[in-house]
Image: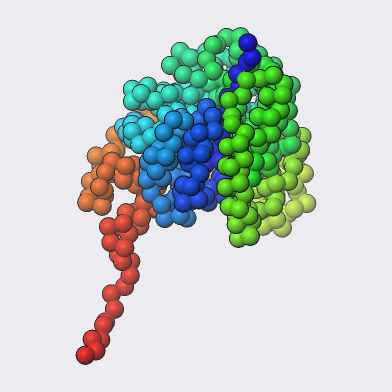
Amino acid sequence: MQKQVQFMDTILRDAHQSLVATRMSTEQMLPILEELDQAGYYALEVWGGATFDSCLRYLNEDPWERLRTIRKHVKNTKLQMLLRGQNLLGYKHYPDDVVESFIEKAIENGIDIIRVFDALNDLRNLTTSVRAIKKFGGHAQCCICYTLSDVHTNEYYVALVKEMEEMGADSIAIKDMAGILTPANAYSLIKAVKAVTNLPIHVHTHTTSGIAEMTYLKAVEAGADIIDTAISPFSGGTSQPATESMAITLKELGYDVALDMDRLKVIADHFRPIKEEFREKGILNPKVMDVEPNTLLYQVPGGMLSNLLSQLKEAKKEDKYEQVLQEVPVVRAELGYPPLVTPMSQMVGTQAVMNVLSGERYKMIPKEIKDYVKGLYGQPPAPISKEMQQKIIGDEEVLSARPADSLAPKMAELQAELGDLAESTEDVLMYALFPNLALPFLKKRKDPFHDVPIQNVTVLF
Ligand code: CO
């Protein structure tokens, strides 16, 4: 029997998040939703990541309404979202009641599969989410943040997968947010994971470093069940490999691929002019399409490389770039090898820049780094030495409990704060996650002229 390989298209989430800063509007998606539903995908990634933030910040859209609209038109295919565990869609820990309510409403409004991860792979930060996903009838996809270091071995990942299965995971995702998963490493990692679990394995990578298609091929050879791709106009660069190209390749190699190639063509035809529009408006920066093999050489995500360079340019210290790149892995080792994913990538990068520019290592330390060492983000993958701990936080205490254990329930308080601006629990959650964006949005919804100054009107007869 042919081995089946399934596809999740990222066009409605990661693809436009990676290439055009999450600026695609619901209106641009709407005409093609039925076609996407009929194309034979395992799932469509439609929500989470930066979509919620971008809807409110740039598009004046209610993110919940987008989800309901997509669900109305996508009746058969599963809808998937990306969730940062206890951080939901942000960078801080939320109390358990907020996490539970958010997951309940996400599922109620149309989400089937929730891919849940923690930046440090601290599984304690996933427990509340996974419990809630199961409670409200969703599919819990537990996700490994893939990174490379002395401690991030196949054995380390296999142990994580076993724990995830015990927690109740319905499937496992390997998320290579930085595009550093090479074909050889993908093959050996997935073989190792497949040896200990029968759960479906879903692989996610980015084409940043020019190897993603090869990585998927080896991943599939090792037994991966589902791969993340993007319909061609929004594929490549910092996005995912093209759906059509991967489908043709795998079909020809004898894999059972359920995708309807004619429909994929119709879908691509729909998104091509939309990409052109983003290009003309300058929202699609040509730089995101560049191949960045330095990501593999330095094992630093592409986005982080460009951030470091712009930080140094601002300080007129571009000549220190090489030195900072050498400093990044040293800082990372000293901090217990956190995966270089948001927000850790920014934090490690900033510390490395400060260490180089100030001329004395750890002379300046950002508050976030101190909080991290105090355990406020969770447990680092490897222990931080007593010496480093002393240098960064002195004699301050390190939290050993799950960070959210110290957070009191908050939904009732948030509800009270909003008063009659909140028409639903969804509104309260919007406010919980992005208070500064939700407030003007909700006020405008109630009264479109709420921020228009009242003027003296001369009535003419
Ligand atoms: Co991604």
Rendered residue at 61%/36% (across/down): 262
Residue nearest the observer in this picture, 43 or 424? 43
Rendered residue at 35%/57% (across/down): 440
Name which quarter of the figure residue 125 lies in.
Answer: top left
- Work out which quarter of the rendered image holds the N terminus and state it: top right
Task: Check the image and report above or below for 85 versus 270.
Answer: above
Q: Position of residue 297 (x, y in %)?
A: 77, 34
Q: Position of residue 105 (x, y in %)?
A: 33, 35
Name which quarter of the figure residue 333 lies in.
Answer: top right
Rendered residue at 69%/52% (across/down): 286
Query: Along the horizontal axis of the image, is 457 left or right of 327?
Result: left
Name which quarter of the figure residue 405 lies in.
Answer: top left
Residue nearest the observer in this picture, 145 or 310? 145
Residue 397 visible in image:
no
- Work out which quarter of the rendered image holds the C terminus and state it: bottom left
Query: Along the horizontal axis of the image, is 104 left or right of 402?
Result: left
Task: Check the image and report above or below for 190 versus 403.
Answer: above
Task: Check the image and report above or below for 182 versus 35.
Answer: above
